[in-house]
Amino acid sequence: MPFHFLNTGREEVKNPLHYFLLIDISNRIIDSFNMPNSFFSVRTLSNLLAQVLFFLNVALVFVIVLLIVSSNKFGQITFLNTTFSLLEIGKKAGTLAAFAFCATIIPGILRRFRVTGLLKSIQIILTPIRPHFGVLMVILALAHYLFVKILPTFRLPLPFTLATFEIFGVLAFFLAFPLALTSNIQSKKLLGKNWQRLHLLVYIILWLIFIHVALLSRSVPLSVVLLVTGAFQIGSLFLKKR
């Protein structure tokens, strides 16, 4: 059954029956995690999230360009009488990029563990939108590198050098870039078996990101998340071979 958006105008909201209808819709969404054929199934939710992520990725590119153009020579922008630093925005973009990358590999981990119930529903939701998370990761990682390393270097008379943790981050980015470019059906058909071999790089990228983050003492919580994700990844691979 197709999903129809509800037209709840100001006059309709005054009707108490519409509040009960909205509650019923919320309950149906929650129940869909255990009822795949329900009015709002997990696959419908996955398709909706795919569209949201697509437009989010497109919008994010424009936002990054806007931030660069609007920033002053000190790498700052002012919005609504509040000053933001591109450096701090870049650090947060790096954190979000790491979480986006984890979202791309979690469905595979859940599939190899043969999960059921709620975890199975999460797997079904995330699997079709993994490519969008991969593209999101690359966009955020690019913003992270631009705002934290490239732009400050260009604006200040400092030599362009890479610290040890930065080397691992750059390697992870350049390995992830071709994966994002080929995260589509056309590339999969064109590359054939080589597509699967190429995307095995995700196992290397995860640990490159972990080392990059772990070498930063201020990023302990994110390091733990990446380490746990990596541990489950290795465990699922051993389980698959049995």
Image (cartoon, rainbow, N blue to C red):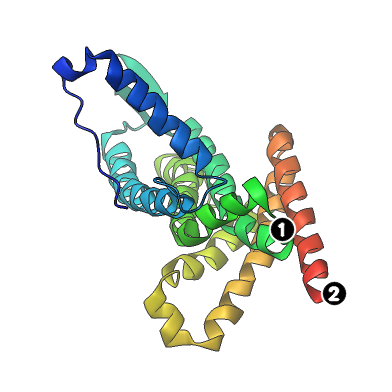
State which tag comes first along the sequence, 2 or 1.
Answer: 1
The residue sitting at 61% across, 58% down in the picture is: 107
Name the residue type under label 2: Arg
Which of the two discs, 2 and 1, sits closer to the camera?
2
Characterize the local packing of mark 2: few (<14), some (14-19) or many (20 or more) Cα atoms within 10 angstroms: few
Q: Is residue 89 visible?
A: yes
Q: Is residue 161 visible?
A: no
Characterize the local packing of mark 1: few (<14), some (14-19) or many (20 or more) Cα atoms within 10 angstroms: some
Residue sitting nearer the eye, 223 or 3:
3
Horizontal and vertical percent for residue 22? 35, 26
The residue sitting at 50% across, 50% down in the picture is: 141
Name the residue type under label 1: Trp
Q: Quadrant of residue 66?
A: top left
Circle number at residue 161: none
Q: Tell me: 26 left or right of 124.
A: left
Secondary structure beneath dot 1 equals: helix
**Count of numbered circles in the view:** 2
Residue sitting nearer the eye, 77 or 38:
38
The residue sitting at 20% across, 25% down in the picture is: 8
Residue sitting nearer the eye, 25 or 105:
25
Horizontal and vertical percent for residue 102? 61, 51
Query: Real-space Cα distance between discs 2 and 1?
Result: 24 Å
Secondary structure beneath dot 2 equals: loop
Decide: is 154 above or below 85. below
Taking the view exactly as shown, the residue that stands out farthest to the front is 17
The quarter in which the C terminus is drawn is bottom right
* Residue occupied by mark 2: 242
Q: Tell me: 10 left or right of 176.
A: left
* Residue occupied by mark 1: 207
